[in-house]
Each structure stands twice: as structure tokens, then as C-alpha cells.
């Protein structure tokens, strides 16, 4: 019997842990970018009476989202290297293969198709690793500034290392400046990331947006060659 239905195969790409951390990271980075740039330019202060602690609440939100990002950054480094699913680690194979780099770069200018071993192409892996290290820097510099304001509890515990890092970086003003400069890396990353995910979803018909929500990719099953 003939049928027009095409059978699709469902493949699990991202584990629940990877997806949950992805969306928590989205939440924390958006909050941190909005509140962070407000802290550096508190434009609402003059417009309202001084007993409304706008700056205080915004700083409080920045710190809560900041501690969330610190926790996610540690958990994601662990998952990347030691998680049960090796879908991300497998991409390392492509990182050291010149052919994989050429295949990816060519596919971006519409020559050939992307062929990758893990979840990411080599260029994508390098960019993700870089943004993870930027997140690590933001966490460390944020904690250094935190310890310079709060001298008890966690701040007190971190004081020794925070003091050392401050000295190595040339003073607290420099720490603050780098924390501010690298905030821009997230703004640029988010814009390019969203564009690339949607573009590659359409270009390669791998449901890149769906996989980070449901975890699954759906591909048509290729019919075996009919030799008769
Ligand atoms: C995506 C990550 C982050 C972004 C985009 C971001 C952005 C910013 C920006 C733009 C500022 C203002 C700097 C200035 O005065 O010019 C700031 C300040 C600050 N950030 Fe972050 N931040 C991030 C992560 C963190 C983390 C993880 C922490 C750690 C808890 C943190 C703690 C702080 C502190 C303590 C300040 C200083 C607040 C003050 O001066 O009162 N940030 N952040």
C-alpha cells in the first residue's frame, strides 16, 4: 500500500539538566545585563524621592542573579566534562580536525552540509567555551566587588582571595572596569547566538530551537535503496 506519510526518527539531543541550566542562564544573564547597566548609569534616581531605594533594589536583584550565575557556571563546567550525556564533549573530536573546520566554514557560505560528531560544530564550540570563560571571569570579578562591600559571611570568607585578585588586577577600579567591559561580550553573544540558532535551524533543518526546549530533534528516516 502506498502512503504519502514520511516516517520521522526522534533523537534525544540535550538532557533535561542541560536544558534547565540553559534557561536559568538566560534568565540570570538578562537580569544581570539590565540591572548591571542600570547600576553603572542610575538614571531613575533623580526622578523619584530618595526614600525609594531603587538603586538598592536593583543592586539586590543583580546580586541574586549574580549568585545564580556563579552556581550555574560551576554546574555547567562540571556537566560539560563529567555529565552522563557526552553530546557536548563529542564535539572536541571536530575541534582538532581541519576537515571539520573547513566543512563548517564552507557550510556557512552555503557550500555543502554541516557534518558534526557532537552537538556543536568546531567554531560554535570555541565560541561557547570562550563565553563560559567570560562567565567565569564575571563571577570572579563580581565576587571580588561583593567582598569589598560585605565584610561578613561569604564576603568575609572570600576577602583574602578577593584582596589578592584586586591587587593582581591593579586595584578595585580596574576590576569594576573589566566587569563593565566584558558585560558587552554577553550583549554581542546573545544577539549573534539567537540569529545563528534560527538561521542554522532553517539552513540545516536540525531543529536547533526545539532541541533546547523539548530536547528532541526529528529527522526523516531515509528509505533503504531499492536495488531492483
Ligand atoms: C552576565 C553577567 C554579568 C553582567 C552582564 C554584569 C554586569 C554588570 C555591570 C554593567 C555592572 C556595573 C559596573 C559599573 O559600575 O560600571 C556590574 C556591577 C556589579 N556586579 Fe555584575 N554583571 C554580571 C555578573 C555578576 C556576577 C556573577 C556577580 C557576582 C555576584 C556580580 C556582581 C556585581 C557587583 C557586586 C557589582 C558592583 C555593584 C555596585 O557598584 O554597587 N555581577 N555588573
Image: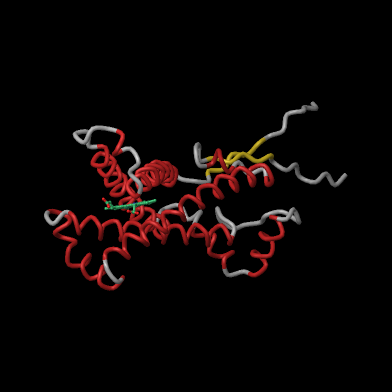
- Quarter of the figure that contains the C terminus: top right
Give the answer, above or below, for where 213 lies relative to 131.
above
Toward the left, the furthest residue is 152
Give the answer, above or below, for where 166 lies relative to 183.
below
Q: Residue at x 64, y 45 (%)?
A: 199
Is 117 left, or right, of 20 in this rendering? right
Quadrant assignment, res 206: top right
Quadrant assignment, res 208: top right
Closest to the observer: 223 or 60? 60
Coloured how? Answer: secondary structure
Q: Position of residue 176 (x, y in %)?
A: 32, 59
Toward the front, the furthest residue is 46
Q: Residue at x 53, y 43 (%)?
A: 12
Please state the total of marks drawn on the protein image: 0
Closest to the observer: 86 or 126? 126
Is 217 left, or right, of 152 in this rendering? right
- Quarter of the figure that contains the N terminus: top right
Q: Position of residue 92 (x, y in %)?
A: 53, 64
Closest to the observer: 57 or 101? 57
Q: Residue at x 20, y 59 (%)?
A: 148
Give the answer, above or below, for where 119 lies relative to 65.
below
Closest to the observer: 160 or 114? 160
Q: Position of residue 22 (x, y in %)?
A: 43, 45
Q: Position of residue 104 (x, y in %)?
A: 66, 59
Toward the right, the furthest residue is 228
Amino acid at each position: 500500500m502506498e502512503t504519502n506519510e514520511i516516517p520521522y526518527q526522534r533523537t534525544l539531543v540535550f538532557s533535561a539538566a542541560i536544558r534547565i541550566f540553559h534557561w536559568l542562564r538566560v534568565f540570570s544573564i538578562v537580569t544581570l545585563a539590565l540591572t548591571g547597566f542600570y547600576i553603572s548609569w542610575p538614571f531613575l534616581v533623580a526622578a523619584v524621592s530618595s526614600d525609594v531605594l531603587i538603586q538598592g533594589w536593583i543592586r539586590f536583584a543583580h546580586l541574586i542573579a549574580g549568585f545564580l550565575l556563579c552556581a550555574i557556571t560551576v554546574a555547567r563546567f562540571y556537566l560539560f566534562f563529567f555529565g552522563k550525556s557526552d553530546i557536548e564533549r563529542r564535539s572536541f573530536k571536530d575541534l582538532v580536525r581541519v576537515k571539520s573546520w573547513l566543512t563548517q566554514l564552507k557550510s556557512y557560505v552555503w557550500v555543502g552540509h554541516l557534518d558534526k560528531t557532537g552537538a556543536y560544530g568546531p567554531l560554535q564550540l570555541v565560541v561557547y567555551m570562550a563565553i563560559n570563560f567570560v562567565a567565569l571571569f564575571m563571577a570572579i570579578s563580581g565576587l571580588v566587588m561583593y567582598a569589598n562591600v560585605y565584610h561578613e559571611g561569604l564576603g568575609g570568607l572570600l576577602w583574602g582571595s578577593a584582596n589578592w585578585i584586586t591587587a593582581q588586577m591593579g586595584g578595585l577600579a580596574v576590576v569594576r572596569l573589566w566587569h563593565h567591559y566584558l558585560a558587552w561580550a554577553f550583549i554581542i553573544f546573545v544577539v549573534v547566538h539567537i540569529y545563528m540558532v534560527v538561521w542554522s535551524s532553517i539552513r540545516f533543518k536540525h531543529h536547533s530551537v526545539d532541541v533546547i526546549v523539548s530536547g528532541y530533534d526529528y529527522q526523516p528516516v531515509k528509505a533503504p535503496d531499492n536495488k531492483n
